Image (cartoon, rainbow, N blue to C red):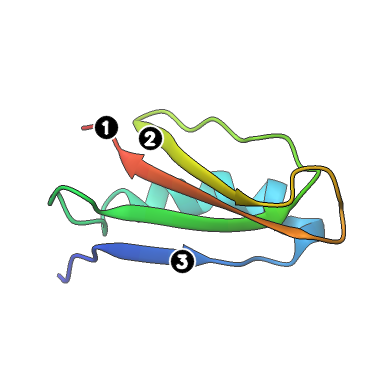
């Protein structure tokens, strides 16, 4: 089994809120335990920040008020 330092997900905006919780469950098994490993999620700028157990939001980049502009959420595992 391979482990990754970075995993990037860019789901269709209409489905992102529903797909990302399931993705998080599977991603935890694939992310590296090395410092700096991150899960990068692209979402619409006006989306509420999702909270995922065992993950910490490290940074948010991009627009935060527009549904038509993307924002990138950078999460790191806490365990």
Kindly identify the residue that appears in the image at 34 percent across and 53 percent down.
Answer: 38
User: Marks 1 and 2, Cα distance to the nearest angstrom?
Assistant: 5 Å
Whether the residues at callouts 3 and 2 have beta carbons within 8 Å, the answer is no
Please tell me in which quadrant of the rendered image residue 43 appears: bottom right
The residue at 42%/44% (across/down) is 75
Lower sequence index among marks 3 and 2:
3
Quick check: 1 left or right of 43?
left
The one nearer the camera, 22 or 71, is 71
Q: Secondary structure at mark 2?
A: strand
Query: Is tag 3's residue or tag 1's residue first in the polypeptide sequence?
Result: 3
Question: How much space separates mark 3 and mark 2, taking CA atoms?
Answer: 15 Å
Check disc 1: other Cα within 10 Å, few if <14, some if 14-19, many if 20+. few
Residue 57's spot in the image, x, y percent? 45, 36
**Mark 2 burial class by Cα count in 10 Å: few <14, some 14-19, many 20+:** some
Residue 4 marker: none
Which residue position holds label 2?
Answer: 55
Q: Do the residues under discs 1 and 2 have CB atoms within 8 angstroms?
A: yes
Query: How far across and how far down the image is residue 19, in percent?
Result: 63, 54
Local SS, label 3: strand
Q: Are marks 3 and 1 in contact (CB under 8 Å)?
A: no
Would you name the residue on which mark 3 appears?
Answer: 8
Side (left or right) of 71 relative to 3: right
Q: How many marks?
A: 3
**Mark 1 highlights which residue?**
78
Residue 20, image x, y percentages: 58, 50
Q: Is residue 25 left or right of residue 10?
A: left
Q: Secondary structure at mark 1?
A: loop
Distance between the Cα atoms at labels 3 and 1? 18 Å
Residue count near mark 3 (Cα–Cα under 10 Å), binned few <14, some 14–19, many ≥20? few
Location of residue 8 with respect to 18 vertically, above or below: below
């Amino acid at each position: 089994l391979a482990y990754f330092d970075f995993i990037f997900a860019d789901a269709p905006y209409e489905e992102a809120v529903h797909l990302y919780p399931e993705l998080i469950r599977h991603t935890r098994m694939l992310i590296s335990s090395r410092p700096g490993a991150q899960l990068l999620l692209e979402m619409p700028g006006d989306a509420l920040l999702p909270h995922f157990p065992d993950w910490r939001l490290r940074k948010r980049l991009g627009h935060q008020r527009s549904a038509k502009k993307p924002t990138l959420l950078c999460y790191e595992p806490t365990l």
